[in-house]
Amino acid sequence: MLPEIVIIGRPNVGKSTLFNRLVGKRLALVDDQPGVTRDRRMGEVELLGLKFQIVDTAGYEDEDPETLPGRMRQQTEAAVAGAAVTLFVVDARAGITPLDEEIARWLRTVKTPIVLVANKAEGKAGEGGVLESYALGFGDPVAMSAEHGEGLADLFAAIREPV
Ligand code: GDP
Ligand code: MG
């Protein structure tokens, strides 16, 4: 069985875009509307000498993005518990929000290695958010752009350590 890498984060940070970028196909629905990913999606990734299963989650997405719905959250928690690595994605353009902080508090309690990903970091607009994300307490963020395919080598370097 391939090691599983699970993507989590609040709605609209670019989890599904990152998933599609890694899988190389548009298996996950990307949208500006929060809550578009209805269930977990899996895909196989073989890139830069790493081979793993990638999982896109929607556990923190609901009609009201600021709530943490019990049932879907449980699914996400189960995925993280079984993961080799969890990618915790934040939006470098939007900066850190209370929901990011809430997810971070929970992630500090899990045993899975966490890689912090500051997505949407292309250009100047992402610089502030990348710096802010250090405060989440997961060390150096991987600054990247899932949409533009920037920072993938850094992401793989960060994944490689725990996997
Ligand atoms: P999810 O809800 O976390 O799965 O987010 P999505 O992947 O559906 O993306 C939400 C929105 O952010 C979409 O409009 C994407 O095109 C946009 N997006 C995703 N990645 C990037 C990025 O690297 N840079 C920018 N500027 N936008 C992005
Ligand atoms: Mg999604």
Image: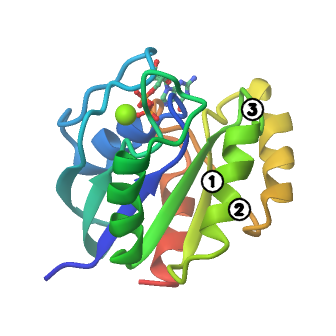
Residue type at mark 3 is: Gly
- Front residue of 47/114: it is 114
Q: Which structural element holds mark 1?
A: helix
For label 3, the crowd category at 10 Å Cα-Cα, with few meaning under 14, some 14 to 19 and many 20 or more, is many
Cβ atoms under marks 2 and 1 closer than 8 Å: yes
Residue type at mark 2 is: Arg
The dot on residue 149 is none
Residue 103 falls left or right of residue 54: right
Q: Residue at x 43, y 21 (%)?
A: 63
Residue 39 falls left or right of residue 30: left
Q: Label 2, label 1: how many angstroms apart (C-alpha)?
A: 5 Å
Q: Write down the residue under mark 1.
A: 103
Q: Write down the residue under mark 3.
A: 126
Provide residue 114's location: percent of width, then percent of height.
57, 71
Residue 55 in view: yes
Q: Is residue 38 above or below residue 45?
A: above
Q: Is residue 8 above or below residue 84?
A: above
Q: Does the beta carbon at disc 1 come under 8 Å from ligand 1? A: no
Residue type at mark 1 is: Ile
